[in-house]
Image (spheres, grey):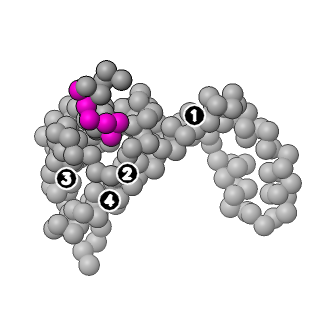
Amino acid sequence: MRLYDYVLNRSELLDLMVDVVYARIAEAGQRSEWRARVLAVAHATRDAALDHEWFSDLLGGRPHLGPHALAVGEATAAALSQAPGVRGIDDLQRALGALNAFIIGAVRREVTERRTTRSTGTDEAAFQASLGPYLTRMLKTGRYPTVARLVIDGAHLNAEETFDHNLTTVLDGITSRPRT
């Protein structure tokens, strides 16, 4: 309770905590080339969210307006504005929206899986094994051929490698979008 001698309420405390995390992310945004800057900020955001899982809960909600959060926003927007496929403010808004949606979704999924593993004591492999008989019965019906291919032929992908690959795919899409 002594903490509230220094901050007005829980919301202000969270704002300060979030901005401390953004300070770490802002350091990554110091690259000169646009793509390197975006990649560094995205990876730093993922790393920060994995280190501070509560941070992932706050991503995508109300805008964070602390000085470090604004610095990250500026670095990212300035970098994307230099991307070849970004021709104006509308393109920039869409590019930022696509990038942020990917980062937030990927990070939240990874954090949710970690939390589920901890709370249930069952990791993803054990969870999948427990559903094996049911899923086998469902796939044998033939109604889900694409899902069957994914389950049978698909590899268990590493979260970090998947993040890298999908981030690159998003950036490639932003930069190579045909002019309409």
Report the residue marked by disc 1.
Answer: 115
Report the residue marked by disc 4.
Answer: 97
**Which mark sits nearer the N-terminus, 4 or 2?**
2
Identity, as a three-letter code, of the amino acid under mark 3? Ala
**Which mark sits nearer the N-terminus, 1 or 3?**
3
**Which mark sits nearer the N-terminus, 4 or 3?**
3
Q: Nearer the viewer, residue 36 or 97?
A: 97
Report the residue marked by disc 3.
Answer: 77
Q: Nearer the viewer, residue 25 or 61?
A: 61
User: Which segment is the magenta one?
Assistant: 6-11
Say what secondary structure mark 4 lies in: helix
Q: Is residue 44 left or right of residue 151?
A: left
Q: Assign the N terminus to one quadrant of the image.
A: top left
Q: Is residue 8 magenta?
A: yes
Mark number, residue 60: 2
Identity, as a three-letter code, of the amino acid under mark 4? Gly
Q: Is residue 26 left or right of residue 143?
A: left
